Amino acid sequence: MILRMIHYSNFIQGQFVESTHGNVITVINPATGEAISTIPDSSDEEVAAAVNAAEVAQPEWAALPAVARAKQLHVLADTIRAQVEPLARVITEEQGKTLPLARVEVNFTADYIDYMAEWGRRIEGEIIESDRPKENIFLFHKPIGVVAGILPWNFPFFLIARKLAPALLTGNAIVLKPSEETPNNAFEFCKLLAETEIPAGLVNMVSGSGAGAGRALTENAKVGLISFTGSVDTGSRIMQTAAQHMTRVNLELGGKAPAIVTKNADLDLATTAIQASRVINSGQVCNCAERIYVQRDVAEAFTEKLVEKMNAARFGNPLEDETVDYGPMVNQAGFDKVMALLESAVNDGAQVLCGGKRGADTSGYYIEPTVVANCTQAMDIVQSEIFGPVIPIIVFDEIDEALAMANDTEYGLTSSVFSTDINEAMNCVEALKFGETYVNREHFEAMQGYHAGWRKSGIGGADGKHGLYEFMQTQVVYLQRS
Ligand code: NDP
């Protein structure tokens, strides 16, 4: 069912601006393969126009008290809450997540904007003791200027807020580039700005390919911070580009989260949490459990329960059936990557305990919920990000063995431990080299935490006080009195 076929335009200087050259990208519904919209494949000049608009709008916005900026963010959050259903449908149509999850995403986005706005009265500088008499040393936090936000497709609406809310609250302007897979919700977001008094030019949205509009944005010398979420390869490319102008980068680059299940785990809790974090959004979440290490004593019982729960997960077209647990993979490339990892695991001796095949409805990129046993640490499926509803299992004997395998990865975003023995759990936490560790719960971060990957999972982080302060630079003032 096509909701509509629509053409979107870039949002620059508070207006939807028709592209001058007419090159477009077609957006596909991954559940059906149908074209649903076209968007501009923006030129370097169009990207530059958006950055220029942001540069002009930023100083006046920065001059406002933070609480006045916060007020507009609260208005924006309320505007989003009034539109949950239509926004959720747009997200589901282009990205493929379930409608209930899309509704959660929209509501969470509004809550996140409110949360960041609440920092308006809480940003603090410092007064530092001087070596000299009659001198004060003040440390101020100042906006950076123009922020570039480059967005992925997996939580596309929320990621707008994760970049925009801290940027605006701290006095910056922003230019956003949505993923070409999921731009529709981003342009719908821009329509909501009309309900606020956020000045024209402060928020701009330009669409296009990564190699085109994305590159042009990261090359622009007027951009002071690039905040990016996506793959390690693209993050690395962005860093190289940013080096030209010493542009700051904030990179969230995915993970390969280990989940350690010890013989002291509550197996019902562990299997429910792991199933949930592997099936949500078809497994296309950077913090999801990507590989399981289970202690031999409980391996059989754990595996049996996990297979039962994975088998129970239902998938299908999320716009036609609101009760499915997950939808299609976002695109052919994502589908092919998961199937290739599965094939190579089987060739290397792994055993598929459930699923393992394409869904019967071949109009969308569906993959059956899959559990893979007899895996070894060297297999690609254990080393590479799967980003799909597929979970490999490795059995271990001693905890140290599990910890060594868990840490044996170039990623360092999230990890988890399942054990009812608090000493055992905390000893594991201490040994795990990841930016985030969940104990006896599903993989999902809170807005007041700090989502920051180690190693190749990124630089800097998002959320909470520490994420907010990354959108500011410091100025130290030495005041000598006579
Ligand atoms: P990418 O990293 O390629 O894309 C993320 C964003 O970066 C998109 O907006 C993309 O544009 C843009 N981009 C691509 N190249 C450049 C560039 N040279 N300069 C500036 N921007 C650029 O991710 P994919 O969508 O290709 O997904 C591939 C894999 O990345 C996934 O399978 C998953 O493993 C990982 N990933 C991780 C995410 C996370 O949450 N950490 C989210 C999404 C993906 P466009 O796509 O429009 O070309």
Image (cartoon, rainbow, N blue to C red):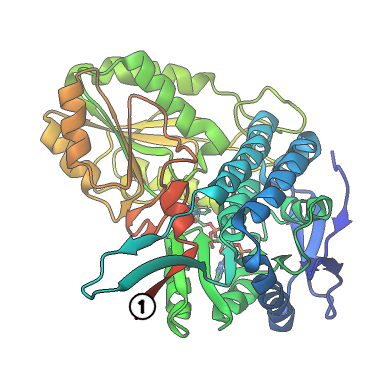
Direction from residue 31 to residue 235 in the image, left or right: left
- Which residue is drawn at the image coordinates 38% and 59% (left, top)? 458
Query: Label 1's element?
Result: loop
- Which residue is drawn at the image coordinates 22% and 49% (left, top)? 408
- Which residue is drawn at the image coordinates 83% and 80% (left, top)? 21
Indicate the quadrant of ligand 1 in the picture: bottom right
Frontmost residue, 216 versus 169: 169
Direction from residue 400 to residue 70 in the image, left or right: right
Any part of residue 117 in sight = yes
- Which residue is drawn at the image coordinates 33% and 21% (left, top)? 303
Query: Which amino acid type is shown beneath numbered disc 1?
Result: Arg
Frontmost residue, 102 versus 463: 463
Mark 1 lies on residue: 481
Q: Position of residue 332 (x, y in %)?
A: 61, 52
Instruction: Kindly indicate the quadrant of the structure image that contains residue 280.
Output: top right
Is residue 379 depicted above or below 417 in this figure? below
Q: Position of residue 470 (x, y in %)?
A: 45, 61
Is residue 171 depicted above or below 387 in this figure? below
Is residue 142 depicted above or below 318 in this figure? below
